Image: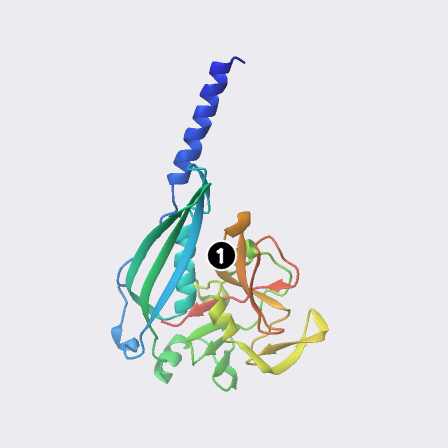
Amino acid sequence: MNSQKILKIFAFYLLIVFFTGCAGTPIKFGGTHPNFDNTNVDFTKGKEIVSTASGFQLLLFIPININSRHEQALQQLMGMAGRDYITDIKIEESWVYAFVGTVYTTTIKAMSYPRKVVDSSDIQQTTSQSRVLNTDGRFIAYSDGTVLDTKTNLMWAAKDNGVDINWQNAKNYCENYRVGGYTDWRMPMQSELTGLYNKNKPRPMACDTSYNNRVETVLIDISCYYMWASETDSSFFRSTAACASFFDGEQAFFRQSYDGYMRVLPVRSIK
């Protein structure tokens, strides 16, 4: 192979890398939901939330987390908001030049407003096809295998998946979950899972009975140490995802391929 052909191949490779570095992952904020009801929002308790994510352009043309920084920043923002409504979104871009490349940072700012707690008539309508099996404070267990948290307006599966599972399979499990006849089950956010943790309510975990989980209600069966959450991160050349520990309340990020002692608990929002 002569030197001219080698140079052409190298130039073609550089061109591919350059355009790959310019091809960022698009994010969509959408508009006002067609079923949006502003009477369900408490506009007296708004707060500003801010998320940031960075990427590095090595030697001007090799992208490291450049393409995914907008998506990462948005996921962080959604995790901070939880179930709050988000308005007044602003995006800021900044960069810092270094000797071997450039650091690009995306900052997203927004206002979040909490939802009001649904009243008893909303709960009755939502669960009209099932009967109450048991109650535990703010939690109501129904005959269709669901548990309603009347404080957060979240409906949980009554039990997790029961076996070790990695993040991608956990996501698929939630999206295909059909308990109660509902089709809008999803993977919970880390902040939603931590709302089920209570250090003062220990009980033996099924996967290791020598240790305890600490769960807010006995109506939800959490069988092992960790629950996967929906937030992800691709920093430092590896893909990780959020999780929450019901052993000690820890919030962490693990490799998405990891499955040891990991479970997932589907959730859906009561509209």
User: Residue at image x 65%, y 63%?
Assistant: 261
Q: From the viewer's perspective, is 194 left or right of 206?
A: left
Task: Please indicate, yes or no, whether residue 189 appears anywhere in the rendered image.
Answer: yes
Q: Residues within 10 Å of mark 1 (few under 14, many from 20)?
A: many
Camera-side residue: 65 or 179?
Answer: 65
Q: How many marks?
A: 1
Q: Is residue 1 above or below residue 217?
A: above
Task: Please indicate, yes or no, whether residue 218 appears anywhere in the rendered image.
Answer: no
Q: Residue furthest bottom?
A: 137
**Residue 128: image x %, image y %?**
41, 77
Quadrant in which the N terminus appears: top right
Toward which corner of the image does residue 158 lie, by quadrant?
Answer: bottom right
Give the labeled residue for mark 1.
232
Camera-side residue: 140 or 117?
Answer: 117
Camera-side residue: 41 or 113?
Answer: 113
Q: Residue furthest right?
A: 210
**Residue 24: image x %, image y %?**
38, 44
User: Residue at image x 45%, y 46%?
Assistant: 56
Q: Secondary structure at mark 1?
A: strand
**Residue 123: image x %, image y %?**
39, 79
User: Residue at image x 39%, y 58%?
Assistant: 74
